[in-house]
Amino acid sequence: ASVDGKAITNGEFVGAGKTVTFTAHPQSGMKVSRWTGIDKSEDKVTITLTVKAGVSVTAECTAIMHTVTFAQPEHGKLTASIDGKDFTGGAAAEGKTVLFKAEPDKGYTVKQWTGAGKEGCTDTTVGLIVEKTSEVSVEFIDIESLAEKYTVSFTAPANGTLSAKVDGAD
């Protein structure tokens, strides 16, 4: 706090009519939510008060929140947690890590993630450090479509037929 540009200490006497400037310094990931002990409650970092009587002023701080959403993908399941507790989407505190786990259906694998800052990643688990509103998704791909494939050509004999099977299947 300061009066006339000079810092004052807690409990110091200030003359009636003087303007005291209070400045809060919230920790990282926090914001001023309101002030107590004054006529008006604001969420500003700096406020002023004209001294009319003895007063005790407090800045109350809360976590900065951002919305994190995700939807269930085709061919699998997506779950999330914060600090080991299930998270189904919604408000998450800035600086927290949302851990996403992709569980592909049988025969599928992770193709890519989007919105988690891990674009193109094929891991089944990714972490998102909450810094802004985010929408996270995972896409699965059929493992069979990833197999290397080659063209197999053949010609039927002039006096008969020729058939072919892949792994014994028609």
Image: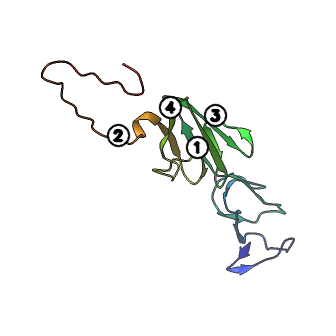
List x then y, in percent, for residue 11. 87, 71
Q: Nearer the viewer, mark 2 or mark 3?
A: 2
Q: Which residue is mark 2?
A: 149
Q: Which residue is mark 4?
A: 73
Q: Residue at x 85, y 74 (%)?
A: 12
Image quadrant of residue 142?
A: top left
Can residue 142 be seen from the camera position used here?
no
List x then y, in percent, for residue 4. 68, 79
Asked which secondary structure carries label 2, the reply is: loop
User: Looking at the picture, does residue 117 appear above or below residue 124?
Assistant: below
- Marks 3 and 4 sit apart, C-alpha to C-alpha, by 14 Å
Q: Which residue is mark 3?
A: 88
Q: Residue at x 53, y 47 (%)?
A: 133
Image quadrant of residue 91?
A: top right
Question: Hey, what amino acid is under mark 4?
Answer: Pro
- Marks 1 and 2 sit apart, C-alpha to C-alpha, by 25 Å
Asked which secondary structure carries label 1, the reply is: loop
Q: Which residue is mark 1?
A: 124
Closer to the chain start, of discs 2 and 3, is: 3
